[in-house]
Image (cartoon, rainbow, N blue to C red):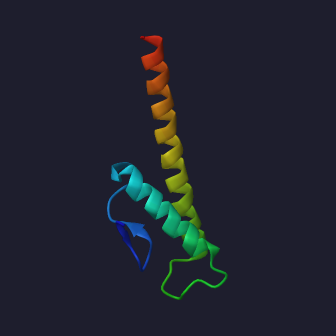
Amino acid sequence: MNVTAKSFLPVHPLERMTTGELAAFRSALEDALSLSTPPPHHAPRETLQKRLDAVLEEQADRERIADRAKAAAHANA
């Protein structure tokens, strides 16, 4: 996974991450946020939540793009 363990920062921008990398990053953030007491080396909970929100937004954008491409393909068929 292209995430630095210390701060849960992606190594490159979300829009450049593969679908698998994005899913792994989301999972790592969700796991970190699920801890009742995060380890001291984690970023603050608010920061992790903002990063998770950005990942969810990127995934939703990709899904919308895929849906539009499918609709266009069906319209042209």
Name the quadrant containing residue 25: bottom left
| Percent x, y of residue 8 | 44, 72
Name the residue at the front extreme. Answer: 77
In the visual, does 63 lie left or right of 33? left
| Percent x, y of residue 62 | 46, 40
> Which residue is painted at 42% across and 11% down in the image?
76
| Percent x, y of residue 69 | 44, 26
Name the residue at the right extreme. Answer: 36
- Location of the C terminus (image quadrant): top left
> Which residue is painted at 58% across and 83% down in the image?
38
> Which residue is painted at 51% across and 64% down in the image?
27
Name the residue at the bottom extreme. Answer: 40
> Which residue is painted at 60% across and 70% down in the image?
46
- Location of the N terminus (image quadrant): bottom left
In the visual, does 62 lie left or right of 16? right
Q: Is residue 52 above or below residue 5?
A: above
| Percent x, y of residue 54 | 51, 55
Question: Total number of numbered labels?
Answer: 0
Q: Is residue 55 above or below residue 34?
A: above
In the visual, does 19 lie left or right of 68? left
In the visual, does 37 lie left or right of 64? right
Q: Is residue 74 above or below residue 22?
A: above
